[in-house]
Structures are given as C-alpha cells and as structure tokens.
Amino acid sequence: MSKMLLILLLFLLSLISSTTGEIKTLTINSDSRPMILFEKFGFTHTGHVAISVSSVLVTSSLNAPNPDASRLGFFLLSEESLLQVLLEIQQNPHFCVLDSHYIQHLFTFSDLSPPPLSRFNRSYPASSPNEYSLFFSNCAPETRVSMNVRTEIYNLDSDGSKDYLSAGQTQLPSLYTFFSIFYLGFLVYWIYVCYTNKRSVQRIHLLMAGLLLFKALNLICAAEDKHFVKVTGTPHGWDVLFYIFQFIRVVLLFTVIVLIGTGWSFLKPFLQEREKKVLMIVIPLQVLANIASVVIGETGPFIKDWVTWNQVFLLVDIICCCAIIFPIVWSIRSLRETSKTDGKAARNLAKLTLFRQFYIVVIGYLYFTRIVVFALRTIAAYKYQWVSNAAEETASLAFYLVIFYMFRPVEKNEYFILDEEDEEAAELALRDEEFEL
C-alpha cells in the first residue's frame, strides 16, 4: 500500500507547477504518510532552502517501539531524477527514498537536538540550477510524526537580495501590472462607448463594465501579491484581496456569459425558468470552486486533502463550463423556431450568426484556458512557467475584446441591419442546417 502511495504521489508531482517560495510555517500532526511534499520551486545557481523544525514528536505502535531516526528526514528531488526514483521504488517494495542516490539529502531526525527541544535549523544551497521539490520522508514502519516546520526557499539576485518567487515566476508582477493597466484602459473606453450610445445601453452593458472593473482589480492585487512575496516572502494581506476580487470576477464572468447566451436585456427583458436554474447552479458552484482555490493556494500539497481539493476544483470548473453552453444552444434553437413563423428572416439570420459566433468564441476560450494553458504549464521548462500565465491572460483579453465588440451598445448594430432585398436569401439560409449544433 505504501509503495502505491509513493508512486501516486511522485506521479502527481510531475503535474504540479512550481509554487511561490513564501516563508511558510506549517504544523504536522500525527501524520503517518510515507512522503509529504512541501514545496516545488525553480532554483537558479544562487538558490537556497532554509528549513527549521521544532517540537518534533515521533510515536510508534507496539510492533515498532524504537523507530530509527535516520529513516525520517528531508530531501530535495529534481524533475530529472523523478523517473529514476520511481524505478527504484518499483524494483524494491521495501526501498526507502532516503537511500536513493538521485536525491539531494538535507537532514534526518538523527541530526535533531536531544529531547525535549528536538529541533534543527539550517540553510542549504541548491546543488545545481533546476526545479526541485522539497519532501519529508518517513521510512519507519508504523510511526506517526508531529512537528512544526518553517521553510524559506529563495534565489539570490545579483545585488544579494532574496527573490522568493520561483525562477519561472519572477516576471509575474510585471506581467500582471501590464495587463491590469490594459484592462483599466479598456474600462475607460467601454464607459466612453456606453456614454456616447446612451439610448442603446442595456443592463447587460453595465454588468460588462463591472466585469472589466473587477478583472482589473483582480490583476492589480495579483501583481501586488506576487511583488511582496518576491521581495519579502509574505503577501502582506494582498492575497486576501486577490481572492475576494477573483471570486467576484469569476462569478461575474460566468453570469455575463450565461445572460448574453440567453439574450437577456438586449433581446428579452426576462429570464425563463430553465435559464434561472442555470444561474442557480453556476453561482453556488463558483462559490465552492473559489473555496477550493483558496485552500489550494493558501495551504499547499503538504495537507492530506490537497489532492481532493484539486479534484473538487477541476470537477466544479468542468460542470460550470458545460452549464454555460446550454443557454447559448437554447437561444440558437429558439431563434430557428421563431424564424419559421415571424417573417423576419433577415433579422433572425443576423441574430443566429451572432449567437453562433458567440458559441464558437466561448468554446474556444474555454478550450484554450482549460486545456492548452494546462498543457503549456506541464510541458514548459521551469524557467518559462510564466509563459502559461501570459498565454492565459492574452487569451482572456482576446475573449473580452471579441465579446465586448460583438455586444457593444450601438444604435445600428451591424448584426441587426435589415435589408429587404436580402430577405429571400435570408429565408433560404435559415432553411440550411448550418446553424444546427
């Protein structure tokens, strides 16, 4: 059983992206796991990891009354050595990772000061530039460990200052600042468009303005969060604001997509019962998704339920992405049915074209941000982890630009221009199966 847990943990390690090297103080209580992952960090040639453990208590069952202290300890494992360690575990069911030649040993419990203090404090340089994971291994059978752990992982800049962001994330403060400025400019322009087209402004346009505002605020807080972590090792409260604005922004985003998909405000002033149910499903699920996001971001892989929270976040996100597609499909089908009876073929063709394009844009956005970005995050070298963040923000910006242009408040929207000469051609087009999904 322990062997399978080790293999599963090391496999999941390969899918986890680098975290920030914040100064963290953690408490482990009566934990029997054979391996505990604390951090994954990209080191430069000046990388260091400082570990302080205190209040260490090892308890064992009656079958193993005297656990060997050298069988419990901390080590660093690089990405290149991961497969080698997996092979060693598969070849020998009783293999202890601390005996591997592919890890960078830090210390074992045999190096602790004598009880009752039972503590250890030391800083280690990274053996070479690479992405390493900090592990605690418990190879003593039937033992449980309790301890307080303080980790401080960083790279040194050329001026000797500490950089607590992973080597692939040190560009994130500048990246988020750039996009936040762009969104603020976008918001100003959107307000100008709404002001110059007052007669065409609908309630959905006000919600879209709110979405831009909270997207900008979310990015500003993300930039400040990463900046303070980079410089001091702690976010100084910016992480709280980040999660608050992220929650509002995500809920607004899904709400706006659902409302546009239903045609609310600019095609009809009300929501049907099934459309209300979609919102009643999506919004509570987004609350759960954001709770999972906070747990994942603020704790780390060392907690026992960390993998479960990741699975919850992924499942909820998939459900929400599927749910927001239904209103668009319903609107397209409703327009097709209406076009057969109301005699306004040209207008209905324009609306169908608009909603079909909206459907394609939403699917493309969800596919890119959920699948392509994950693939980039997985395959990119640790020094270029910021590329996946840049790709995600670029795709989001492109999505916002396209959607806001398609549904901008103008008196004569090009999608709804009527031309009597094209009425017959529009009727023929509507009979085509082109708009079937």
Image (cartoon, rainbow, N blue to C red):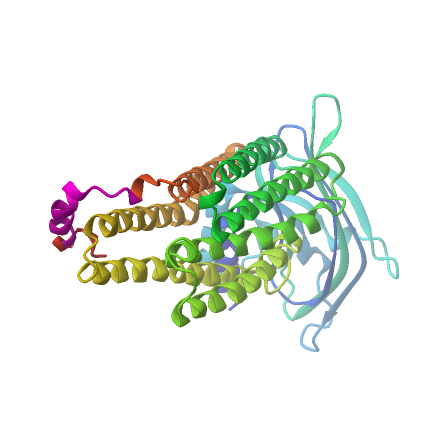
Residue 145: x %, y % from top left:
72, 64
Which residue occupies the extreme top position in the image? 158
Q: Quadrant of residue 200?
A: top left
Q: Nearer the viewer, residue 234 or 149?
A: 234
**Relative to 102, is 68 on the left or the right?**
right
Rendered-image quadrant of the C terminus: bottom left
Q: Is residue 353 magenta?
A: no
Residue 41: x %, y % from top left:
61, 41
Q: Nearer the viewer, residue 296 or 189?
A: 189
**Relative to 250, is 58 on the left or the right?**
right
Residue 183: x %, y % from top left:
55, 36
Please give the name of the residue rendered at 73% of the width and 34% of the height, measured from the top-left corner.
Answer: 231
Please give the name of the residue rendered at 74% of the width and 43% of the height, measured from the top-left corner.
Answer: 234
**Relative to 72, is 309 on the left or the right?**
left
Q: Quadrant of residue 172?
A: top right
Exactly how many numbered labels are in the figure? 0
Q: Is residue 426 magenta?
A: yes
Q: Quadrant of residue 18?
A: top right
Report the magenta stretch's main SS: helix
| Residue 46 visible at all | yes
Q: Nearer the viewer, residue 155 or 231?
A: 231
Q: Nearer the viewer, residue 343 or 95?
A: 343
| Residue 135 visible at all | no
Which residue occupies the extreme right position in the image? 116
Residue 394: x %, y % from top left:
46, 36
Q: Is residue 410 above or below residue 174?
A: below
Range covered by the magenta-colored residues = 416-430
